Image (cartoon, helix red, strand yellow):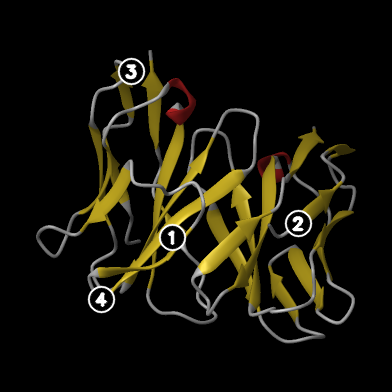
Amino acid sequence: EPEVTQTPSHQVTQMGQEVILRCVPISNHLYFYWYRQILGQKVEFLVSFYNNEISEKSEIFDDQFSVERPDGSNFTLKIRSTKLEDSAMYFCASSEGAGPYGYTFGSGTRLTVV
Amino acid sequence: ILNVEQSPQSLHVQEGDSTNFTCSFPSSNFYALHWYRWETAKSPEALFVMTLNGDEKKKGRISATLNTKEGYSYLYIKGSQPEDSATYLCALVTGGYQKVTFGTGTKLQVIP
């Protein structure tokens, strides 16, 4: 069964450092998403991406965040200057279309900012 | 900010019992409702995508219903098994299918 792959599974970074979280969505999927879950809280939408551009983003997705699909297979989330409150589980997801399609999630990257 | 509520927050049932839980959401600007099962240390797995008022979907012992007019969906598990133990998330899709708001989840523990 096709999978969404995320690397690394766990990243520890110093406050103020830049991090890049990587995802390889399912190859025939067209829509890509990042979500995060801070420990003990709800899963939160960050951003959706289609046709090489952001189609929706949440209030959380400020100028510190950016997404890119650099080579047609990877989908990355960059956090420019990490803060303690960025510590969370970050999930990438993809879907084959807009509309009534479920998302396939990756297994997540646990980001710890110290 | 959309409010998607799930109840109960957690549930313990005996193996073989049937159970159900609720997802409540604002009914305006509705596009779809997703249900996911999320086992510890794994990624959320899509169970159902529901779009029409009155939709009923079934997958094995798990089924779901949708009422978009009153803003709720029920998930039912018949004859719970220990492998059903997981957190069940509902997610409301708005904003042209590309913005998803998750509920808080219902954590189910099935006791053998």
Instruction: From this view, report whether residue B69 is shown above or below residue B73.
Output: below
User: Label 2: few (<14), some or many (≥20) within 10 Å?
Assistant: few
The earlier-in-sequence mark between 1 and 3 is: 3
Quadrant housing the C terminus of chain A = top left
Q: Label 2 marks which chain's residue?
A: B
Kindly state the secondary structure of the residue where label 2 is placed.
loop
Q: Label 4 marks which chain's residue?
A: A
- Circles 1 and 3 on the same chain: yes
Relative to B40, is B43 on the left or the right?
left
User: Label 3: few (<14), some or many (≥20) within 10 Å?
Assistant: some
Relative to A112, is A5 on the left or the right?
left
Find out whether the residues at labels 1 and 3 contact each other: C-beta distance under 8 Å: no
Which dot, 4 or 3, sits closer to the camera? 3
Q: Residue at x 72, y 39 (%)?
A: B82
Q: Residue at x 28, y 50 (%)?
A: A66
Kindly state the secondary structure of the residue where label 3 is placed.
loop
Front in this rendered view, residue A8 or A61:
A61
Task: Please give the residue where the numbered disc 2 appears in the rendered image.
Answer: B3
- Labelled disc at residue B57: none
Task: Please give the residue where the numbered disc 3 appears in the rendered image.
Answer: A15
- Labelled disc at residue A104: 1
Residue type (three-letter) at the residue carrying disc 4:
Asn
Between the C-alphas of marks 4 and 1, the distance is 18 Å
Q: Residue A81, how many percent across, how many down?
A: 29, 29
Which dot, 3 or 2, sits closer to the camera? 3
Between the C-alphas of marks 4 and 2, the distance is 29 Å
Between the C-alphas of marks 4 and 3, the distance is 33 Å
- Labelled disc at residue A51: 4
Relative to B83, is B15 on the left or the right?
right
Relative to A10, is B75 on the left or the right?
right
Q: Label 3 marks which chain's residue?
A: A
The earlier-in-sequence mark between 4 and 3 is: 3
